[in-house]
Image (tube, rainbow, N blue to C red):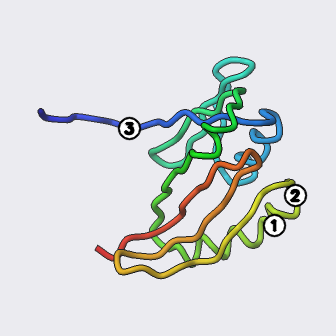
Amino acid sequence: MEHKAKSIRPFIGAKNFELSRRFYQDLGFEESVLAPNFSYFHTGGFGFYLQDAYVKDWIDNSMIFWEVEDVQQHWNALLTLDLPGKYEGVRLLPIREYGWGRECFLHDPSGILWHIGEFYI
């Protein structure tokens, strides 16, 4: 089967929708409001849907890998945003090195785990 895909857009939930909206705006995503409880957040050529829906088991098992060109530069930018200081529950974990590349980790206000990294290959 030949794929001519243009994007993949995951759906993520929010424990507190308004708080999560502000978090992702602070993170640098542009928001397109689709409905009062549903938005599309995007940057560059990719994005995701944020919905006002919270199912603990779903959120606790949600992970997104965000590939960046330079994880060190991204890490430095994340530190200047002080997201853990602004948002309860947000955690930022430092860069780790692996055989395939390196990544840092960011937990959003609902607990969704973002892997932010770059590949060596």
Residue contact at pointers 1 and 2, CB within 8 angstroms: yes
Residue at screen point 75% across, 39% down? 21
Residue at screen point 38% across, 38% down? 7
Quadrant in which the C terminus appears: bottom left
Q: Point out the frontmost of discs 3 and 2.
A: 2
Picture disc at residue 86: 2
* Amino acid found under the numbered disc labelled 1: Asp
Task: Please tell me whether residue 90 is drawn above or below residue 121 in the rendered image.
Answer: above
Q: Is residue 13 left or right of residue 7?
A: right
Task: Please tell me whether residue 88 is drawn above or below residue 77 in the rendered image.
Answer: above
Residue at screen point 67% across, 52% down? 28
Residue at screen point 56% across, 42% down? 42
Picture disc at residue 82: 1
Tell me the crowding category of disc 1: few under 14, some 14 to 19, or many 20 or more residues within 10 angstroms, Cα based: few
Picture disc at residue 7: 3
N-term-proximal mark, 3 vs 1? 3
* Amino acid found under the numbered disc labelled 3: Ser
